[in-house]
Amino acid sequence: MKPKLFLHICCIGCGAYIAQDLKKDYDIELFFFNPNIFPLEEYEKRLEEIRKVARSEELEVSVGDYDHDAWLKLVRGHELDPERGERCRICYAKRLAETAREAKERGFDHFASTLSISPHKDARALSEIGNKLATLYGVKFLDRDFKKGDGFKKSCQLSRELGLYRQTYCGCEFSMRH
Ligand code: SF4
């Protein structure tokens, strides 16, 4: 039997490639927990695209709470931080913490996030946060920088082949200006 992996996913453009790759070794469930995404229409569009691919790949999808106002309170004072700065660290930590907590509660062996595949994400920060949460919650963190081995390029190729939606900004309103 394969180990069970609870995989946080932010968008299908990056997630499809990672999910296909990890499926060989893990029994995966996708977790869409992204209260950072703004506006609601964008959140719904990303979720719908994930559901479509999940159906064809026969993967389960769980959806966390969407409370964007609470997320805004968390990052207050960091609105003007550049991408990869403190606002993003807070955002990674919020999403990974909920993933770890839910993974533990539901008896998964591992948790992980697709976030590290993006060249705009700080893979070292994600690794530090994930490993701390693994200790805190007692569930293993699959500590991978998915952009290694041309991961990002391959994810873009697969998106084109499958005709997947790829958004033009990370997710929050503050990333729209980049
Ligand atoms: S830019 Fe992306 S990772 Fe950073 S705070 Fe906004 S949504 Fe989160």
Image (tube, grey):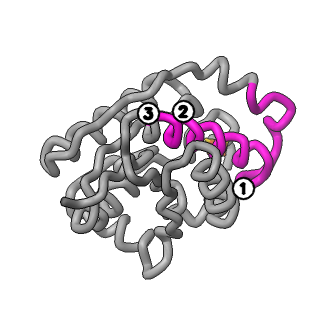
Q: Is residue 72 left or right of residue 131?
A: right
Location of residue 58 in the rendering, given as x and y in whole percent from the top left corner: 14, 46
The residue tagged 3 is 105
Please tell me whether mark 1 sits on a helix, a strand or a loop. loop
Q: Measure the C-alpha gap from mark 3 to mark 2.
A: 25 Å
Q: Amino acid at mark 3?
A: Glu
Q: As drawn, which residue projects farthest toward the bottom?
A: 149
What residue does disc 1 label? 84
Residue located at (20% from left, 40% from top): 52
| Residue 69 picture quarter | top right
Residue 71 image offset from top left, x and y in percent: 66, 26
Q: Amino acid at mark 1?
A: Arg
- Residue 154 belongs to the span the image colors magenta: no
**Nearer-the-camera pick, 158 or 21:** 21
Give the residue at x 21% y 57%: 162
Q: Amino acid at mark 2?
A: Ile
Residue drawn at (69%, 38%) of the image: 174
Asked whether 133 or 146 is in front, the reply is 133
Which of the 4 image quadrants contains residue 30?
A: top left
Q: Which part of the image, by quadrant, shows the N terminus? A: bottom left
In the image, is residue 27 above or below residue 171?
below
- Is the CB–ligand 1 distance for label 1 below 8 Å? yes
| Residues drawn in magenta | 74-102
- Element carrying mark 2: loop
Mark 2, residue position: 37
Instruction: Measure the C-alpha gap from mark 1 to mark 3.
Output: 30 Å
Predominant SS along the magenta part: helix
- Where 64 sits versus 28, above or below? above
Q: Earlier in the sequence, mark 3 or mark 2?
A: 2
Residue 127 seen:
yes
